Image: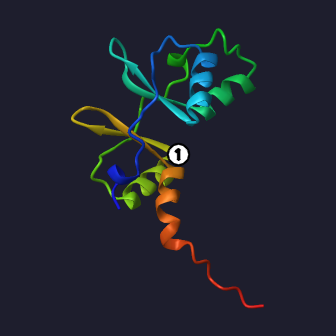
Amino acid sequence: MLVRDAMSTVVLTIGPAHTLRQAAALMSARRVGAAVVLDPDGTGIGILTERDVLNSVGLGQDPDAERAHAHTTTDVVFADPSWTLEEAAAAMAHGGFRHLIVLDRGGPAGIVSVRDIIRCWAPARQRAPQVPA
């Protein structure tokens, strides 16, 4: 199975000036764990994850004052829609992250998460091995 078959094509995008509270509210409303941060005048395409928001709040920072650009990962590993899910999972495991922005023709075409991969693999592996009694 390929990334294009598993990725979410409805991508939450925010700007770098969004506050962390705004970003968290949008992620919560959409029930997603990451937002693509588009900064055409700065770093280009980045990602803000629930972990980034959690780390900021855990440090005692004000989510109404902190801006997405200060917490965005900009050295992003991007996936191609033609990657296999094994390639995507390997990239995530190697990098220690749970989301990959999928680029097609230079722009974000989707996002694939560990949850998406598990959802695709689970039916094929739903028969758990029998444990001897």
Decide if residue 60 is on the left or right side of residue 11: right
Q: Is residue 132 above or below residue 103?
A: below
- The quarter of the rendered structure image containing the N terminus is bottom left
Among all residues in the image, which is located at the extreme left? 105
Residue 50 point in image, percent of width and height: 61, 33
Q: Which residue is mark 1?
A: 98
Which SS class for mark 1?
Answer: loop
Q: Residue at x 30, y 38 (%)?
A: 103
Q: Quadrant of residue 67?
A: top right
Decide if residue 41 is on the left or right side of residue 54: left
Tell me how the rendering is colored: rainbow
Q: Residue at x 40, y 46 (%)?
A: 7
Q: Residue at x 57, y 21 (%)?
A: 23
Residue 38 point in image, percent of width and height: 39, 21
**For this rendering, which residue is in front, 126 or 86?**
126
Q: Is residue 4 above or below residue 132?
A: above
- The quarter of the rendered structure image containing the C terminus is bottom right
Name the amino acid type tagged 1: Arg
Q: Is residue 44 above or below residue 118?
A: above
Residue 132 point in image, percent of width and height: 73, 91
Residue 3 point in image, percent of width and height: 36, 52
Q: Residue at x 54, y 51 (%)?
A: 115
Q: Is residue 7 above or below residue 27?
A: below
